[in-house]
Amino acid sequence: MVLHQTEFNYPVPFQSAFDEAVKVASATYRSADGVHPDLPGRRLMAETWLRATRL
C-alpha cells in the first residue's frame, strides 16, 4: 500500500503519547539524548501512528 501525501491527513499525537509515557518510565528510557528515540521510543511512535491512522 502506498500512501500519497494527499491521503495522509491524520493528526498523530506523538507529543501526547510521550507525555503520558513519561508518567510510567523516565524520558531517557525512550530517548537517551532527549531528541532521537531509542527502540522503546520508536515502538511508542509506531503504536501511536497505528492507533491514529486506524491501520
Image (spheres, rainbow, N blue to C red):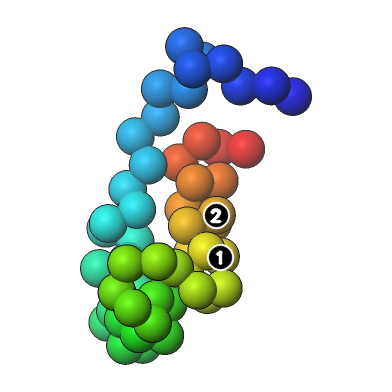
When the figure is inspected, residue 37 is found, relative to residue 25, above or below; the finding is above
Say which residue appears at 55% left-offset and 54% top-offset.
Answer: 46
Q: Nearer the viewer, residue 54 or 5?
A: 5
User: Which image quarter is the C terminus in?
Assistant: top right
Residue 20 visible within the image: no
Asked which secondary structure carries label 2, the reply is helix
Residue type of the residue flagged with mark 2: Ala
Q: Position of residue 31 (x, y in %)?
A: 39, 76
For disc 1, the marked residue is: 43
Q: Position of residue 36 (x, y in %)?
A: 40, 66
Q: Alpha-carbon neighbours of circle 1 within 10 Å: few (<14), some, or many (≥20)?
A: few
The disc placed on residue 32 is: none
Residue 30 visible within the image: yes
Q: Which residue, as the protein is rendered here, is positioned at the far right? A: 1
For disc 2, the marked residue is: 46
The CA distance from mark 1 to mark 2 is 5 Å
When the figure is inspected, residue 40 is found, relative to residue 43, above or below; the finding is below
Left or right of 21, for residue 37: right
Asked which secondary structure carries label 1, the reply is helix
Left or right of 55, for residue 10: left
Badge 1 vs badge 2, beta-carbon distance below 8 Å = yes
Q: Position of residue 16 (x, y in %)?
A: 27, 58
